[in-house]
Image (spheres, rainbow, N blue to C red):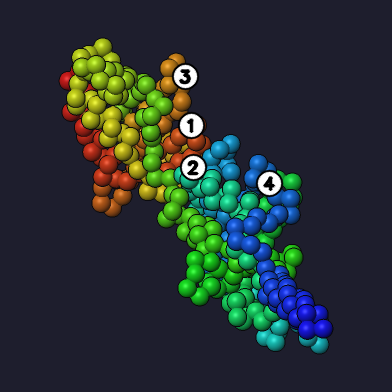
Amino acid sequence: MQLNKLTVNWIFFLLSLGLAFFYANRGMVKSNTSILLDNIRYRDFESLTYRTQKYQIKIFERQKGSYWAKYEQFQSLKEPGKKENAEGDLSEDSSQVSTSQQIIESSMFKLTPDVDALIRNWANLQIEKNIGKSDQLDLVKFGLKDREDLISIADTKGNTSQFIIGQQSFKSPFMFVKDVKHMDILLISKDLIDGLVLARSKFFQSEMLSGDELDRLTVESFGIVAEVKAELQKATQDGKEEKIWRYLGKEADKNTDIWVNKLFSLRIREYQDLSEEALGEKYEPTMLIETFSGDKRQDTLRVYKTKKKEGHDYWISSASGAFVARLVTSRIETLLSDFKSNFQKH
């Protein structure tokens, strides 16, 4: 009889443990679990957007394998409504006010290839926990009460997933978000959100050229050395397997190699929504650069300058990248000056 009672107690104890575990983990998933974003796939990616009342950042693929971001800053405008008076005329009605957003700043910039990992991670979203349905929880606890900051990921097939951004979980690298469509409160990595919010500082493509895939350049400088062309190609020196640039038809020249590496160190300050035609009409052509890999032309770059109150601004256009950008002034001015001193004698 005592054995039977002990058995019953053990059964009750195990059932209690099972129920406690079930309720404690109800609505939760194991760490690093992927969720399906309404059939969104990385290969069909179209855009990833972060929007607040004050600004919006949108990442998109402008060309195959080339990602860009568009930044827009908003200003809220309040406009009184209209009402019809006894004479049938319309007048302002201060009791009915509508609010609209006006774009006061807009810019686009190219992103480094590193942003691809961020896009992949959003397309294959890993969640730390699924807390539960938002209509069954106190949104204040998660920083989601009356929140409007929104992240959207969309694909080329018309699928979209949206997440309202809440607060950071206490003493953890995770943030609470609300899945708009499924009404789930999720805990996801803060890095996923920061990567999008801080896209300009994290992924801004400032590098203009890389010599890794190039073996020949043609450089022509207008206005510095008239009709001077220098063809530069990689060479070996003392049997070393390093890329040495030399003036075509001359002995290996250390100054030439230094100059070419200065060319590769040019940095973009900002991108501009200008056509190359408009750039050529407004600014003075200063340098033409053609890059080659073998016999294949990789890009044609044109440098322009324009006067400002103190000194000049310098702009560059890329035929392959289809963009116009303003360069860091100090680097391009050094490059132009050194071009004159290094190649004029040849």
Q: Residue at x 24, y 26 (%)?
A: 257
Residue linked to disc 2: 113
Return the x and y of residue 270 as percentages of the image width and height. Answer: 41, 49
Q: Earlier in the sequence, mark 2 or mark 1?
A: 2
Q: Earlier in the sequence, mark 1 or mark 3?
A: 3
- Give the distance between the C-alpha atoms of the residues marked 4 and 3, in whole angstroms: 34 Å
| Other residues around mark 2 within 10 Å, as few (<14) / some (14–19) / many (≥20) | few
Q: Residue at x 54, y 58 (%)?
A: 192
**Above or below for 259 versus 235:** below
Name the secondary structure under disc 3: strand
Q: Quadrant of residue 263?
A: top left
Residue 89 versus residue 346: which sits nearer the camera?
346
Amino acid carrying mark 1 in the image = Ala
Q: Earlier in the sequence, mark 2 or mark 3?
A: 2
Residue linked to disc 3: 296
- Give the distance between the C-alpha atoms of the residues marked 1 and 3, in whole angstroms: 14 Å
Residue 140 versus residue 84: which sits nearer the camera?
140
Name the secondary structure under disc 2: loop
Amino acid carrying mark 2 in the image = Pro
Amino acid carrying mark 4 in the image = Arg
CB-based contact (under 8 Å), mark 4 and mark 3 = no
- Give the distance between the C-alpha atoms of the residues marked 2 and 4, in whole angstroms: 19 Å
Q: Earlier in the sequence, mark 1 or mark 4?
A: 4
**Above or below for 210 versus 271:** above
Name the secondary structure under disc 1: loop
- Give the distance between the C-alpha atoms of the residues marked 2 and 3, in whole angstroms: 23 Å
CB-based contact (under 8 Å), mark 2 and mark 3 = no
Residue linked to disc 4: 41
- Give the distance between the C-alpha atoms of the residues marked 2 and 1, in whole angstroms: 19 Å
